[in-house]
Image (cartoon, rainbow, N blue to C red):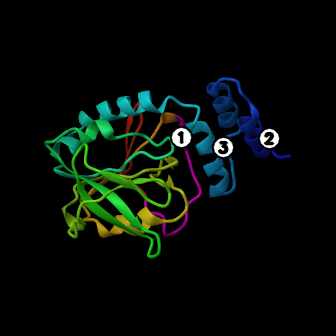
Amino acid sequence: MSINEFTHTLCLAMTTPKLICYIIAMNSALNYKTKSEYRIYAKKLRTELDIKKISVLISKRVIAQNFYKKSKNILGFYPFNSEISLIELFKDDSKNWFLPSIDEVSKEIFIHPYKYGDKLVKNKFNVPEPVTEKENDLKKIDLVFVPALMVDKKGYRLGYGAGYYDRFLPLLKDTCVKIVPITEELFVESLPYDDFDVPVDIVVTEKMFNSIF
């Protein structure tokens, strides 16, 4: 058994505090070979973190940044399965908020106006989606929050594998800021990526703000 296989097996099995599992994994340099291995690791680790507390800290950090203050039309995402929650940001009614929906056949993302408290309906994957009319002008988006399981220091994110955002992000205007909010433990040195993967501009964690340029 390789060190990565041993670490992965141990992380899944152990019931000791998450920090021990994290240290063991980091000591093996997280040298997994495939995206699937990283996904398993990230999903397991997320369940052991205080995502609610981390989300509050990230939201406070975002609000203090100039790129957020200058943005008027913002595409967020509704939290799913231990993702970072942006719900506190959605309460900022000085911004025009949008949320995504997906087409499971074409693998497209559509955007919809959203105000805090609007009705949401879960899709096939149990992700809450808006029921408001689609917004066709994608170029109006100034800032987009992109969900991720992990992200690396080159801005390459690890998603769930369907490629929705890699197809969607190039449709936005060049000046649109692409940001991943994520816990510090899942912001890593390097991840495997493909030619079609689209890197983000900024990574924000509960501990720091990182520009990828």
Residue 50 coordinates in the image, percent (x, y): 50, 28
Comes first in the chain, label 2 or label 3: 2
* Front in this rendered view, residue 112 or 181: 112
Q: Is residue 15 above or below residue 79?
A: above
Q: Which is in the foreground here, disc 2 or disc 3?
A: 2
Tell me which corner region of the image, top left, top right, bottom left or bottom right, holds residue 25.
top right
Q: Which residues are magenta?
A: 185-198
Q: Would you say residue 191 sits in the magenta stretch?
A: yes
Label 2 residue SS: helix
Name the residue type under label 2: Phe
Q: Secondary structure at mark 3?
A: loop
Amino acid bearing label 1? Leu
Q: Which residue is mark 1?
A: 186
State which quadrant residue 136 falls in. bottom left
- Residue indicated by mark 2: 6
Query: Mark on residue 30?
Result: 3
Name the foreground residue: 43 vs 30: 43
In front: label 3 or label 1 = 1
Could you tell whether 94 is left or right of 63 in the image?
A: left
**Gap between marks 3 and 1, in whole Å?**
11 Å
**Viewer-closest of 7 and 40:** 40
Look at the picture and state if 22 lies above or below 99: above
The mark nearer the N terminus, 3 or 1, is 3
Residue 173 drawn above or below residue 43: below
